[in-house]
Image (cartoon, helix red, strand yellow):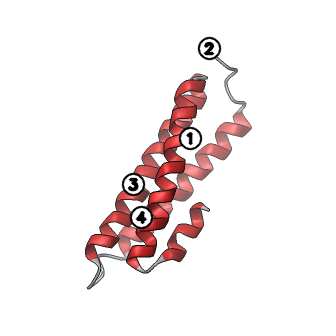
Amino acid sequence: MRWPRHDRGDSRRQEETAVTFETWLSGLQALGRPPGGQSAWDDVLADVVIIVELNAAQITAAERGDPEAFSTVTADLGKTQVELVRATEAAGVAECADVHR
């Protein structure tokens, strides 16, 4: 099953989302590791890295007109969001997940 490729406006919006998360990841990494709770912080960063990678995969699936891949990636993004919320709460920075809500 194939579906029409997204129009340029859809692709642009997805690319803007990807840039937002790439910028967010860079900002989080620039903060450095906290003096305490390093494991929890590492979990936060790992989840954001996964989201950045999945955003790129979602764009690729949309550009290729691949609904199965797009659906799988979208589901994976949802699961990772749940993990990100848990990780940010554990790290004491729950508001960091707000960008993805």
Above or below residue 26? Residue 36 is below
CA distance for labels 2 and 4: 37 Å
Q: CB of mark 4 within 8 Å of CB of mark 3? A: no
Q: Please report the residue visible at 39 percent of the width from the left and 65 percent of the height from the top.
A: 44
Classify mark 1: helix, strand or loop: helix
Q: Quadrant of residue 41?
A: bottom left
Number of residues whose C-alpha sits closer than 10 Å to that of mark 2, classed few (under 14), some (14–19) or many (20 or more): few
CA distance for labels 1 and 4: 23 Å
CA distance for labels 2 and 3: 30 Å
The kind of residue tagged 4 is Ser
Q: Earlier in the sequence, mark 4 or mark 3?
A: 4
Q: CB of mark 2 within 8 Å of CB of mark 3? A: no
Q: CB of mark 1 within 8 Å of CB of mark 4? A: no
Q: Earlier in the sequence, mark 1 or mark 2?
A: 2
Above or below residue 3? Residue 94 is below
Badge 1 is on which residue?
74
Indicate the position of residue 60 as horizontal and vertical percent values.
52, 32
Query: Taking 1 as reference, is 76 left or right?
Result: left
Badge 3 is on which residue?
49
**Which residue appears farthest toward the top when viewing the image?**
1
CA distance for labels 4 and 3: 10 Å
Residue closer to the observer: 27 or 49? 49
